[in-house]
Structures are given as C-alpha cells and as structure tokens.
Image (tube, rainbow, N blue to C red):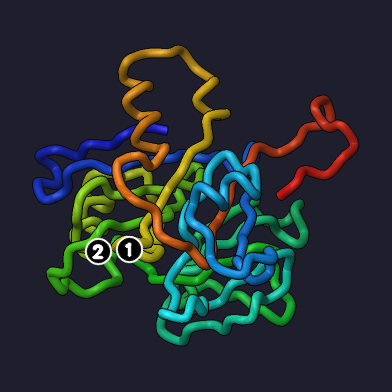
Amino acid sequence: MSVWQPRERCPDIDSLLVVDADPERYRFSVHHYAQEGFAYPPAIEEWQKRTHHEVVFNAGLFRENFAYLGLLLKDGRSLGSRRHPSWHGLFVAEPAEPATRPNARVLDLTIDSFHEEAPSYREAAQSLMLLDKTGTIRVRQTGKLAYQTLVAESRNGHILVFKSRGLVTLHGVGQCLRDAFPSIRVAMAMDGGSSSDLLVSDALWAEGTPSPQRTSWRDLFAGTSGPHIPLPAVIGMSRRETPASSSGQAPKH
C-alpha cells in the first residue's frame, strides 16, 4: 500500500491511494449483498468484518434500487445481472483452468473474449474501460468531478487498485495513469462519487517496519477521512493459502 502523488506530471490530480497485489499471492472474491444473505447492502466496514478479506473495494455501478449494472460472477455463476453492451472493462479472477491463464486480469471486451455461459474465470465484475493497451483513454472528457476507484493491470501481471483522495475527472485520471504511470497496461473504472471506497484491514499493516509515514497511510486506508455508504457489491482480496500454512479448512470468504 502507498500514496501516489504524481505532482507536476498531473497538475489536476492531488494524490491516489494504491494497493499493489500479486495475484500469485492474493486471491480475489466477488460479493453481492443479496447472495450473502443481507437484507440491505452494508457499508464497507461491515463487508470486511463479514468476509474477513484483507482488502475490500467497491465493485462497480448500480441502480438506485441496488441492482448491479453489468456482468457480475461469483464462483462461475451469474449473480443475476447481465452484460452491459457498451461497457468494455471486465475484471476477472480465479481461472477455471488455473494452469492455462493468469490468476487475475483486466479484460478489454472490445478485443478480449469472455463467455458467461462457460466462463474462463470464476470471479468477474464489469464496468467502464478507462485506458486500453494502445494508450487510448476510453471515456469522454465531461468535466464532471468525483472521487474514483480504479482497477488496473500492470505489465508485470500485478493488479493495482486506486482510490483518488480528491475530486477528479475520469478522463483526467486516465490521462494521468497513461502519462505518469508507465507500468500500467490497462485500467478500468469502478463506481465513483460517494460509492468510491477502499479499505485495508489491520492485518496487512502488521507487516513491514513501523514509521510515521506508514501510520499516516494506515489512517487513509482505514477510510476514516469520510463516511461510507451502502455498497451492493464489493471485491475482496486475501492472501492465498500455501501448503505449509493450510490447516485443511477452507477460508471463510
């Protein structure tokens, strides 16, 4: 976890929270409130308490009645939503055949195939394509300012989750990633505004050397700087079990 400050490279962007995850070490899970037995969508703190994930972030756009907009899969099954015809970003994780595909990716549905009837990945969440591998920004410049949550795939195969600390335009933050974060291969935008949310549990902060900088970062990633609203769907991230650490019991996610 870190705080990225692009400074003069992106004068309209203050700073962004960043979680850099190696899918070989961390697994991703999609959650939807109705399938989890909630009567009402919980805020991100409750999601983290219930799922025990070490990182939780909002999973996409939804209607006022909390219906998810776009394709949403968990354990290879649709959670009741359908593919949005004009949204081409698709976060996928946990391949059906692990030996043949990366553990997590950001797909561009204009060029990457994905068949929900026989999904190649068990977890999937669809939203807006932001930046493609040609360097093209895939959203219009509307001038609308909002907090944003972004999911990117880096050239080394890591998954990066960003949350803007200030109000930004989607086009502007896409241009900033393209020009000032060259290791990013592709990026997509999850829901923005008051739905933009990212929480890192205390367990991850126990690692590493304590410092005043890490302490200040910890507060930012705990979401203490603003209120949390109900989130119908989230994506959680947890460390993979290894044979040496496995107790023989499945993790509770």
Task: Check disc 1: other Cα within 10 Å, few if <14, some if 14-19, many if 20+.
Answer: many
Q: Is residue 12 left or right of residue 52?
A: left
Q: Residue furthest bottom?
A: 85
Is disc 2 placed on a helix, strand or loop? helix
Q: Which percent across, then down, holds residue 9?
A: 14, 42
Position of 70 relative to 224 (above/below)? below
* Residue shown at the point (61%, 43%) measured from the top left: 53
Residue 192 image label: 1
Q: Which percent across, then down, holds residue 118?
A: 74, 77
Q: Residue furthest right?
A: 248
Q: Nearer the viewer, mark 2 or mark 1?
A: 1
| Front-most of residues 88 and 124 | 124
As shown in the figure, which amino acid type bears the numbered disc 2? Answer: Leu
Q: Which quadrant of the view contains residue 81?
A: bottom right
Regarding residue 134, the answer to whether it shows in the image is no
As shown in the figure, which amino acid type bears the numbered disc 1? Answer: Gly
Q: Assign the N terminus to one quadrant of the image.
A: top left
Residue under pointer 2: 170
Q: Which quadrant of the view contains residue 110?
A: bottom left
Q: Are marks 2 and 1 in contact (CB under 8 Å)?
A: yes
Closer to the chain start, of discs 2 and 1, is 2
